Amino acid sequence: MQIKYGKPVMEGISIGKIFVYNRMNNDVCDERIVDVETEIARYKEARTEVIVNLQELYEKSIHTVGKATASIFLIQQMVAQDDNYNTAIESMIRSQKVNAQYAVAKVADSMALIFKMMDNTYMRERAADISDVSEKIINALNGGIVNVIHSDEPVVLITDDLSPTETYKLTREKVLSIVTINGSVNSHTAIIAKTMGLPALIKTDIELNENLTGKLAIVDCYHNCVYIDPSEEVLEVAQNRLQRDLKQKEIYKELRGKKTVSPQGKTINLLANINSLNDVDIALSNDAEGIGLFRTEFFFLAKERFPTENEQFEIYKKVLMKMGDKPVTIRTFDLGADKATEYLRMPEEKNPALGLRGIRFGLNRSNILITQLKALLRASLYGNLKILLPLIISVEEVEKVYKILNDIEDNFHSKGIEIGDYKVGVMIETPAAVMISDLLAARVDFFSVGTNDLTQYTLAIDRQNQFVEPYYNAKHTAIKRMLDMVAVSAKANAIELSICGELAANLTLTDYFLSRGYNSLSVVPEMIFPLKQKIMIP
Ligand code: PEP
Ligand code: MG
């Protein structure tokens, strides 16, 4: 039995077979293709995806490992953009009518061999870059991580790291839990895993050894470790713990449907944070009294182009209909920073977390925001819609959004398109929003405090950066004082007040939140029952 330690993103335990996902090892089959142009287009798309990912990797790692080491990603980008490399692959697909994966693998092998035989050390080292970048392209052609998990049962996925988009594409039918070597517990990757109810260990001290695939593992997020090939005794203890967790879930069921009222008579709305339409079922099965945060940007990131108004309308309508008359808070896309993809054509930024993201991205690229707001207003007919604006720092931004909303309403009115009632609120997730919360409260229907970013921007700690993670303290006195201040502004203007950052699920702070007047808490679905129990039966 081996024991490897990591950082858990939430409590829980899972027992299953391991699947090691090593981006560097893809099986490639030689397949004949009929439509050469489609295959070349597929290749070009995969290559562009890799170029964009390499840029992201470069920007991310420059802060952590320094410019010199990070430049490896720029070199790999150059390989992917190299004319000889691309022409060789495209002409092989064309002349031999083979699948793109096979052409990439063959061209990579022969080019790497040529480089390996060169006299110059620098050039010899480039052979590894050719192989690396080719593996990445093959991986993208294979459809990414979800498509390479071949197992009849859900697996314990062990890999180096996952991007938020990769995690978003995972399903609970395929994955039981996640173990990564890198990453940060405050990242969107961790939050998405939590929302899906997947126990996950981040920054685990483990090697990506393919021989582990198929072995039994216990991911124990109570003891922050993964047991590989567990002994009989350890397995028995884990199975008992799993049974206990299941029993606890049965106990929680007794609270189902009951209003969340504290012994002092305070009523609290317990809402769910979701990232996709699929998450609505998880929210409902955990008795969510509404959706407190729907992060719509992941729907954008999973696509190769901007979703159309109709595509968005269908999603929002379905979420609203599934939730009936319960409130559904849909946040306009918070794209940018770690949530970017190729077709967004983001400018190169030195500090993306302080860059074009959230509402400033939306107002800067207003056509995209207008399309989303149109879809939302059309969907407002089908439920209880609350529109939430991310990363607000000024009243002017809110006024600009109101202007867009008014124009859309006028336009719909002239065309006879009906809309329903809706509310507009803002995320309080920047120190600026806290400091002007009195002014904002006078202009909006509700506040939702995003403690994840509020912590990042208040403490000057990059929430993505594993090296400064120990300093990321969402319970810092500065944050608490900000929460107090926001509550005062909300109360003075009698607007709804909620917290949707991860701190909302911290059971040690529940009493404090209630005492300050936070009457809604929006958390990952799995945390709704524990919170309900904590409030009703303290
Ligand atoms: C937050 O910042 O607290 C929040 C809820 O938004 P996100 O985690 O999506 O940035
Ligand atoms: Mg945020």
Image (cartoon, rainbow, N blue to C red):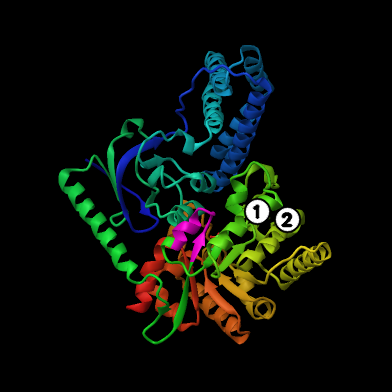
**Number of the label disc, if any, that sits on residue 496:** none
The residue at 44%/45% (across/down) is 182
Q: Position of residue 128 (x, y in %)?
A: 51, 25
The magenta region covers: 272-284
The amino acid on which the numbered mark 2 sits, given as a three-letter code, is: Thr
- SS at mark 1 in the image: helix
The residue at 41%/63% (across/down) is 286
Residue occupying the far left of the picture = 233
Q: Quadrant of residue 141?
A: top right
Q: Position of residue 303 (x, y in %)?
A: 62, 44
Horizontal side of 156 relative to 290 (left or right) equals left
Residue 171 higher or lower than 450, as above or below:
above
Residue occupying the far right of the picture = 414
Horizontal side of 475 relative to 388 (left or right) equals left
Q: Which residue is mark 1?
A: 312
The amino acid on which the numbered mark 1 sits, given as a three-letter code, is: Gln
Q: Which residue is mark 2?
A: 371
| 281 in the magenta segment | yes
Q: Earlier in the sequence, mark 1 or mark 2?
A: 1
Circles 1 and 2 in contact, beta carbons < 8 Å: yes
Quarter holding the C terminus is bottom left
Q: Quadrant of residue 486?
A: bottom right
> How many numbered discs?
2
